[in-house]
Image (spheres, coloured by chain):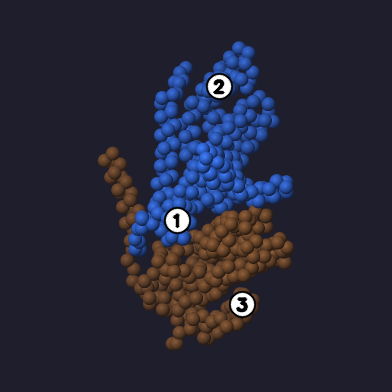
Chain colours: A blue, B brown
Amino acid sequence: MEYTFHWARMFSGEPAQWMWDGFVTTLQISFIALICSMLLGIIICVMRMTPFKPLQWLSLAYTEFFRNTPLLVQIFFWYNASHFVIPASINEWMNDLYYWFPGPFSMFGHEFVGEWMLLNVEFITGTIALTVYTSAFIAEEIRAGIFSIPKNQLEASRAVGLSFLQGYRFVILPQALRIVIPPLISQALNLIKNSSLCMVIGVGEMMFQATQIESYHAIPFEAFSVALLIYMTISLFVSFCITMYNKHFMIQVRY
Amino acid sequence: MKRLVIVLALVLSFMFAASVASAGKIEDVKKAGVLVCGVKDSVNLFGFVDAETKELVGFDVDICKAIAAKLGVKPEFKVVTSKNRIPMLVQGSVDMLAATMTHKFSRDEQIDFSITYFMDGQKLLVKKGGGINSAADLANKKVGTVKGSTSEKNIKKAQPKAQVISYDEYPQAFMALKQGKVKAVTTDSGILAGLKASDDNPEKWDIVGEFIASEPYGLGVPSNDSAFRDFVNKSLNEMWLDGTYQKLFKKWMGYDLPEGWTIELWPM
């Protein structure tokens, strides 16, 4: 097979513009999904820890269901099957939604187009799928972290008059979350890479744009090499930042 | 650092070292005894899985079978998509593409094409009575297409205000139309007719609009192998002259060839 590389074409005009759009969308979807899945994961995990049985079952069912089904199936589920569950009026509103956030605005005497983030049903369902899937893993990891904190600390916190939730908020979670930082990094990296699956429902993230460049400009190897390098750079950057944070700000946990 | 550079160099050399010399395609195919055709498996009438026999059938599939028969080899089918068909032909995973592919000059850079074997045009598939009758009605409305298709590019030109959502395959775009996630699906009318026929209630859908663009389909053949391309062209001409082509067209499309249209016929 003979193949001539045309790197110059990749870094100018349409391909460069598309790649940039894809990069921005990947960052947006990953960032939103990461924050939401962290919060959701903590909630699910604390639910599992409550002494109230039905909440425990709910949380168990949630984690096992979303952890044990492929993400691709879940994306299709949220995109297509949710149609039958959501009320028709919300459905119609969601389906017609095509809004560029934050919209046109003026600041310092300049008019801005404000087309930073495209909100449509594809983007939203993609983010929901990523969030729910990752939160199941995060919940399990935080639970493992909580188990590593001696149980008598919670009992002690109850003894000094903190409520159950306060005990978690002020005593257990601050220690447990520090311990689970390394596994959470790998979850964050997984999430960034998993976001590429959203291309199947037409979210214009980086893999989507790479395939577009492949088919319109016939430079597949260049497009995918660049996408690969960008994914690698984002991942390395994220893990570097968290490791640095870990080193400088983490209070050592000692027993 | 030095070690990292060496490792990276090794990885890159693995990635780019793959290069295979090949003789002419005709000899290769005859030696292997099979002609590997890239066809689609989800485009009704052209390349799709028959619900009863569970076999790949369609107009494209039959064209492949006819050309393989002329070569005296067995046809073998590999499923391709709009996205991966050209790379698969370039890499040699398939010998020929019959995958509802529009002949474009920009595609000529990587592969070669036979003469046009099917003439189609791009239209819109919409819900009956939905108020959309042409591309002009699609301003600020969502339209479904398939990634990497010519229709995707054309609709953006014909209606720059349309909000184009690109899916992996046509049935997915049709599903989105059924659920109201897009207001129209746009692609070649032959494919749209297939989609429409695949629904339980075909009368609920309409194919509307003028031709947004004409789509001449060509068979994809490997670049710089004129012997093979000549053979394919000659086979198509022979099929037209002995009436096989017309029979196949009638069999799949259900109507006679449009008046006045012929494939490009060269004197023998």
Tag 3 secondary structure = helix
Whole-percent x and y of residue B90?
41, 64
Residue that mark 2 sits on:
A172
Q: Is residue B18 left or right of residue B132?
A: left
Tag 2 secondary structure = helix
> Which residue occupies 53% across, 58% down?
B147
> Which residue occupies 42% across, 33% down?
A241
Residue that mark 3 sits on:
B251
Residue occupying the far top of the picture: A160
| Mark earlier in primary sequence (1, 2) | 1
Tag 1 secondary structure = helix
In which chain is the residue bearing label 2? Answer: A
Residue that mark 1 sits on:
A14
Is residue B216 in view from this perspective? yes
Report the amino acid beneath label 1: Glu
Report the amino acid beneath label 3: Lys
Question: What is the quadrant of the N terminus of chain A in the image?
Answer: bottom left
Whole-percent x and y of residue B75?
48, 72
Q: Is residue A205 left or right of residue B200?
A: left
In which chain is the residue bearing label 3? Answer: B
Instruction: Mark 1 vs mark 2: give the one in front.
Output: 1
Q: Image height check: is A221 above or below A60?
A: below
Q: Image height check: is B125 above or below B242?
A: above
